[in-house]
């Protein structure tokens, strides 16, 4: 499924950082929300996996809560990213 987002290595973000004196180049932070929906066990598994990958601390996720009428559960992570 990753190939749907990145077609080749040239599209991967670079770790190179350059700074300019202009105030227009100041990076802006944006908050994105990442939702995991499924069973309590499945959600816990994804949260642990993303913690292992150093994507987010387990404590940064919202408590697992019911999601709609489907009987599924959900948890939400709010993550700051450069926009």
Image (cartoon, grey):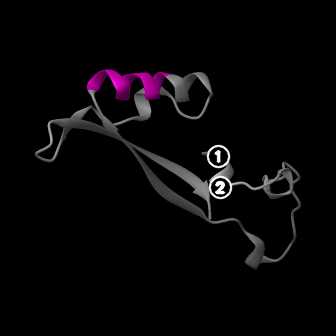
According to the picture, the residue beneath numbered tag 1 turns out to be 2
Magenta stretch: residue 14 in it?
A: no
Q: Are marks 2 and 1 in contact (CB under 8 Å)?
A: yes
Q: Secondary structure at mark 2?
A: loop
Q: Residue at x 53, y 33 (%)?
A: 56
Magenta: predominant secondary structure element? helix
| Quadrant holding the N terminus | top right
Rendering coords of residue 83 (x, y %):
62, 65
Q: Secondary structure at mark 1?
A: helix
Rendering coords of residue 74 (x, y %):
28, 38
Q: Which residues are magenta?
A: 40-48
Rendering coords of residue 23 (x, y %):
75, 76
Q: Residue at x 82, y 77 (%)?
A: 22
Kindly report the distance in space between the C-alpha atoms of the residues bearing marks 2 and 1: 6 Å
Q: Is residue 77 left or right of residue 1?
A: left
State whether residue 12 is above or below residue 23: above
According to the picture, the residue beneath numbered tag 2 turns out to be 5
Total numbered badges shown on the rendered structure: 2
Q: Nearer the viewer, residue 38 or 24?
A: 38
Q: Nearer the viewer, residue 31 or 48?
A: 48
């Amino acid at each position: 499924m990753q190939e749907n987002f990145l077609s080749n290595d040239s599209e991967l973000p670079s770790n190179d950082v350059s700074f300019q004196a202009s105030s227009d180049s100041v990076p802006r932070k944006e908050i994105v929300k990442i939702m995991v929906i499924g069973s309590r066990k499945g959600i816990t598994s994804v949260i642990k996996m993303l913690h292992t990958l150093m994507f987010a601390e387990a404590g940064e996720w919202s408590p697992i809560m019911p999601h709609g009428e489907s009987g599924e559960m959900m948890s939400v992570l709010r993550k700051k990213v450069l926009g």
